[in-house]
Image (spheres, helix red, strand yellow):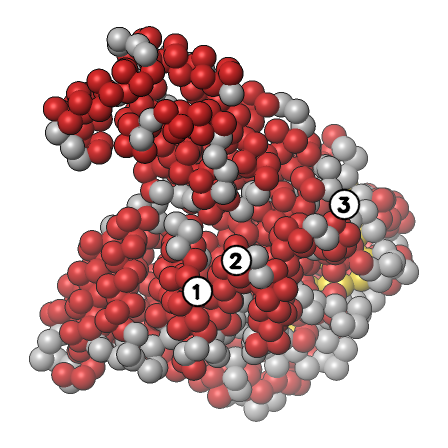
Amino acid sequence: MIVSTKLHIPHVRKVLVSRPRLMHKLNEGLQAKLTLVSAQAGYGKTTVLSEWVKQCGALVAWVSLDKQDNDWSQFWSCISASIKERVSGFGQTVEPLLEKGPLLSLKPAITALLNELNRLTGELVIILDDYHVIDDSDIQHSMIYLLEHLPPHIHLFIASRSDMAIPTARLLAKGELIQIMMQDLRFQLDEGHAFFSDTTDLLLTKEQVTVLFDQTEGWISGLQLAALSLKRSMNIGETLQQFSGHQHHIADYLLEEVFLHQSESMRAFLLETSILSRMNGSLCQAVTGQVNSQELLERLEKLNLFVISLDDHRSWYRYHQLLSDFLQQMLLRTDPDKWIQAHIRAAKWLENHGFDEEAVDHYIEGKQTEDAVRLIEKKLPTFVQSKSVLLIRWVSVLPEDSFVEKPMIELFYISVLLGVGEWKAAFSRVEQAASRFQAQEGNWTDAEWKQAMGNIYFFMAVTSYLQKDLERTSEYFEWVERYMPEGSFFQTVGRNRYQGHDSFDDQLALINDLHAADAFLLKWITIWKDKREYPFIGFLYASYSKLLYEWNRLDEAEFYVNQALGREDIQPYARILMQNAISASRIQQAKGNLNRASELLEQLKSQINSPDVELFRLKIEAEQACLSVKKGSRQDALDWLQRCGLAHTDEVSLNRMAEHLALARVLSVCERMDEALYLLERLERLLNREDRLRDRIKVLIIQSVALYSLGQKEDALVQLETALLLAEPEGYIRSFMDEGAVMTELLSAYMKVQLGVRIKSSPSVSLAYVGQLLQALHVTSKEELSLKQILTEREAGIFILITHGKSNKEIANRLNISGETVKSHLKNIYRKLGVNNRAQALERAEEIMTLA
């Protein structure tokens, strides 16, 4: 829940001093991407921006940040909500992504945000106040990406106490950054004189103002505090002499001066409410017990005592951070018990009023671990879906023994780590949790203990799968079956929402050993297929159908995918349903049933029942674009290219691999080869680095086809050979077949080149494999045909192995025959070719190839 006051432009009670020079510099920000207003506390960043907004006449979306927003999902949700306040309907494609937090990949949400910003017709200013509370690395990375791609009519203004982790030098060089620093914000001497003469009733001489101005170095809050202190001074000249030293020393002195001049009840009120990041009368009353809390807040505002109104109704306020920090330190130092009690009272009020995240923070600060854990457990499904960064922070600061009897919290924490890609941390956490859970046998009920152990073994299986260890994965699944035969709740969490984590959903992409995957998948499909409420099996069906498809066993692939689509338990789970439906469509394409393939994708759109249906549709439309290419519907592919929002320059990601590949195919068919090759080159590097064999083979194949289409035959064959080398051990077939006639030409050209090469010391691809692919494409090369007219099938197979320099022993091992049998076949080959040895046999074969 986003507090609406965070999105309001702070109310400025009155302008302290007219500042035309600063207003002019802020106006320059309307010609730049980023305006950075950076200075330590008390330099009037919020005030000057609020005043500028009133004068500039631009459409402005404002977000007042606090520490609760140091969460990727919350941060960008605040920005989207603020823009929506100004632009009706904004955020329709962004909000569903942001609700899922970092379980999703960072880029889809930011790309969606950029696309919606790009569609805005007028200028928009986005102001982020107090950005220094943000240090989350994911937010910083996504902010850099946003700035790199920000449309020219969108202008970002950021107020922060510290420099941002962005490449400011590059932005400055391009003229895309306006910097407003401390020296810009500090009052000039004439402004200092104007401040004292126009906004206070102090009768200071110009010399006194100059002395005070020099000593405070134009620090606006220092001047305000000085004015408050001087009003109470019996000897202004003497008081002025006491102002010396560095800025923070002045701040401490002035704050103490102001604090000590308040009444006892006001001092107590200030101390106890200083722990609040925002406050209203009711919350302050709960914390302090003072029934006149609203009146005290209004009195503080009238005193200009660094209390900022957060709305026009004077309901919510916050303290200036300097005052808040000072008061909190004083309270903690002088009365730690009261510090704890204030946090506890605040937590209870916030929980009762539905502000659960803030309540957890206060329970933790108040050392109420049990209450913090209770509230986390109560709201766990919500937190894990949209507040994962907060959840990680909470669990990391809570003592581990505080939730040792709350296994669901530990398990959710592990699921978050897995979801955000922190796999190493998850692996370690899983092992630790397994030991702790095992030690609880007898302390928990038998049902609770078995459920916890079943869940932890499920996660141990997942971590083993991520490490490509299928044997160990299978062992852990055996333990899951033993302790929790109906399956883990975590097998299906979030399956109806778009998580942006496609690289995890497309589970076959994680495994390089297809033969091991074959045995693993078939085993667990067989074990689980009769369970009626076990949707997790849908992922296995999808993976197995894709594997069988790759091996060109289309009827079997169709059988298994139809079994999945016929199960009622997977229908509500959009992510599982989509994997199977797309697999089914590809099988029909391979069988030549293109209309049926198209129908399946259209049906999938209507079958998805999810709040994120539009995001799922984007994925489906990428698949439809690939089908349009196969059907020869170039215009449909072009139409998709115009509306998909993808570009060949986008940062490549495993989570968007299917879309990247679709884009590369469409760019190729639209004769934008340079763009396609640029994208494919970066995809190949990523997949090689991440050890994703299947998709790397696909990229290499698409590269070879694109190069061949450009007439770069040699480069095309180099890429093809790399793909063949990687694909042969695993038996890939369809990835080559799906390229159609152009792959026939490429493979035939490769066969011809290889047959024309004499025996090599390091043979590359088996020509038997190339021949298998050509046969699958219903092609028999002239060379192969000519040889088969002379040799038997077995003799032709042995001869192809000879062309690769295989010894008699290697041929025998490859074909599982004896060495004597090989020698017998060689005699027949030599006799039929009219030669006496291997070298002559190869020369004779080359002659046959040339004549053919």
Mark before the other along the chain sequence, 2 or 3 = 3
Which of the 4 quarters of the picture holds residue 397? Answer: bottom left
Dots 1, 2 in contact, CB < 8 A: yes
Residue tagged by mark 2? 591
Question: Residue 33 has which mark?
Answer: 3
Mark 2 element type? loop
Identity of the residue drawn at 32% across and 48% down: 514
Question: Residue 51 has which mark?
Answer: none
Mark before the other along the chain sequence, 1 or 2 = 1
Q: Which dot, 1 or 2, sits closer to the camera? A: 2
Q: Residue 852, position in %: x, y?
A: 51, 20
Of 558 and 513, nearer the camera is 558
Mark 1 element type? helix
Of 316 and 186, nearer the camera is 316
How far, Cα to Cα, is label 1 from label 3? 52 Å
In the picture as drawn, the residue positioned furthest to the bottom comes out as 291
Residue tagged by mark 1? 558
Residue type at the position of mark 1: Glu
Mark before the other along the chain sequence, 1 or 3 = 3
Identity of the residue drawn at 55% across and 52% down: 658
